Amino acid sequence: MIELLRRFGGKFRRYMVIGPACKLIEVIFDLLTPLVIAQMIDKGIGAHDVSAVIHYGMVLGAMAVIGISFTLVCQKMAALTSQGMGTDIRGALYKHINKLSYAELDRFGTPSLITRITNDVNQVQLAVALGVRMLIRWPFLAVGSMCAALAIDLKLGIIFLICTPAIGLVFWVVMARCIPYYKQLQAKLDRIALICREGLSGARVVRAFVREDHERERFAQAADDQANTAIAVGKLSSILNPVTFLVMNLGVCAILWVGGIQVSVGELTQGQVMAFVNYMTQTLTSIVYVANLVVVFTKASASASRINEVLNCEPSITDEDNEPVALPQAPATDVDAPVSALSLSHTSFSFGAGAANAVNDVTLELPLGKTLGIIGGTGSGKSTLVSLIPRLYDASTGSVSVMGADVRTWPLDQLRHVVATVPQRASLVSGTIRSNLTWRDESATDEELWAALDMAQASEFVRNKPQGLDAPVEAGGKNFSGGQRQRLTIARALVGSPQILIMDDSASALDFKTDAALRHAIRERSMRGAAEGELPLTTVIVSQRVSTVRDADMICVLDHGSVAGLGTHDELYATCQLYREICQSQLRREELEGQQGSAAPASVPSPASAPAAPASTCAKEGC
């Protein structure tokens, strides 16, 4: 908590001084009130002097008005401080989270980050507000009341010395058992947020598999677990008020008993006894509120540590001191040496220390303007491999180079402007089609947006919208079909003229005709750029469809993160058993027979009779 105050409380320092100062003035009036009441009783009521009663009543009224005025000022200072700090903390958290690499985001988890940026910040806000308003009030009121009471009579002060430690002992015992529960509560809120996110985002799948009862049960278990912890804390906390008020009331009874005797012998006046009772009540009530503040600050401390954990997490991927990379010039003629658009050299990657490699020793080079197809089974590392190109993850070993420069030397903004990625899961945000398409280039003209939509085969359904580019997009693009969402995300990646386009299985919802038209349009764009002397578009296509990658200039076949084969479609069909099996599972007999005549013997080779593959095209044993 102190670390957050140091980091974000600087510009609110004056509010944190003015607020408690105003509250201190109010407390002084609260401490003077019992003395004024004592005078009213002794000099007014006891002496049957109405004018004295009216005089002291007016004094009390004036003190109340002044105290309320200072309280309002303190309340405003508390609101400005807590809301201002909360806004700044949320802004800093959101900004820092967006700097974290995929590795850190995977470690924290999205539900936990959402809980930290909402619930945890709310807990800190509450603690700051109560700190400005109450942190000085109740301790100062307790100590002041005790000193004033002891100044009235030392004999009655012994009752204070007995009651105060008794209440303090109760608080210590209860709080010592409650504090561990508060930390557990935050972790269990993360669990509830995770289940809610999974259930709501996958509502269609849940209903399709009739898993509503299972999801309700899973949520109920998490909610009950959190509720049981909260109830356990509540049971412990519920002991506080009855016990403290019992001790306080017993103390008041003792004061009235002993004070009554002293009034009878003339050692104290009735007003002094009432003042003593008031001070006793103020002291013990203050202790109760101080304990409640301890509960709030304990919760805030647990939340602050979770917030600091995120803020202190250093991104593993940074671009500090990286100078802009000069893009290469396109070859002037076909005989010029080809420019390398993408190069991987013995590249490996694993999710965390000690984990098996998700990408293992991949080496390949793709010339500028060419197309690389990546194919393989589920979990073979296709998406992980292409995530290394725009540096969403950093390779564990080896290197990844774009346009001849290691990706670690690129400024991230420039790298991700040169490399456009279409993710496997189509993601749109609420707004309009135009606002979604201009993510890469906010100054893109309508002509450029329509050109990107034409290339992505999305212009037809966008033109059919009454509002065209300004048609609304709901959160997550729920008002579009899966194929429409994919085409819009492809169009978004094409805006801004990227040099490398990565499509991570982003056409899986498209029919074969639309998929073929999309690839043809991208190929034409690349050829047109080369003809105009510009850098041609280099494309990386990840797919599980053979038809999508078969026309690529180079195909990389992945198997458990390793390269099983590298070459053209014809070469791989003839030499790589894994690729051949994929083809046989997807292509029609006529297509396979045509393939046999051009790349293989008269009959389709079985895995057992497949010819041995050259080392340059098939890296795995058995290909």
Image (cartoon, helix red, strand yellow):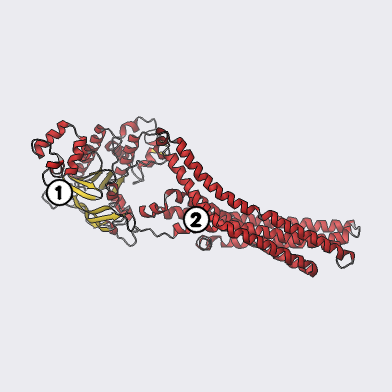
Q: Is residue 290 left or right of residue 49?
A: left
Q: Is residue 144 visible?
A: yes
Left or right placement of residue 477 versus residue 263 in this view: left
Q: Classify 185 as above or below 436.
A: below
Residue beneath the point at 71% across and 64% down: 164
Residue 133 in view, yes or no = no
Q: Which residue is mark 2?
A: 89
Going by the image, does 207 lie left or right of 254?
A: left
What is the crowding at mark 1: few (fewer than 14 residues within 10 Å), some, or many (at least 20)?
A: many
- In front: 615, or 8? 615
Question: Mark 2 or mark 1, which is nearer to you?
Answer: 1
Residue 98 x/y as whole percent: 40, 52
Kind of residue at badge 2: Ile
Mark closer to the chain start, 2 or 1:
2
**Residue 51 location (% of width, % of height):** 88, 57
Asked which secondary structure carries label 2, the reply is helix
Viewer-closest of 385 and 605? 605
Residue drawn at (24%, 44%), measured in percent from left and top? 376
**Residue pictured at 72% horizontal, 56% vertical:** 245
Residue 189 % position (x, y): 50, 49
Q: Which residue is label 1 attached to?
A: 617
Label 2 CA crowd tier, 10 Å (few <14, some 14–19, many 20+): many
Q: CA distance from mark 2 to mark 1?
A: 54 Å
In this view of the protein, which residue sits in the foreground, 368 or 180?
A: 180
* Amino acid on which the number 1 mark rests in the picture: Thr
Residue 558: percent from left, percent from top: 23, 47
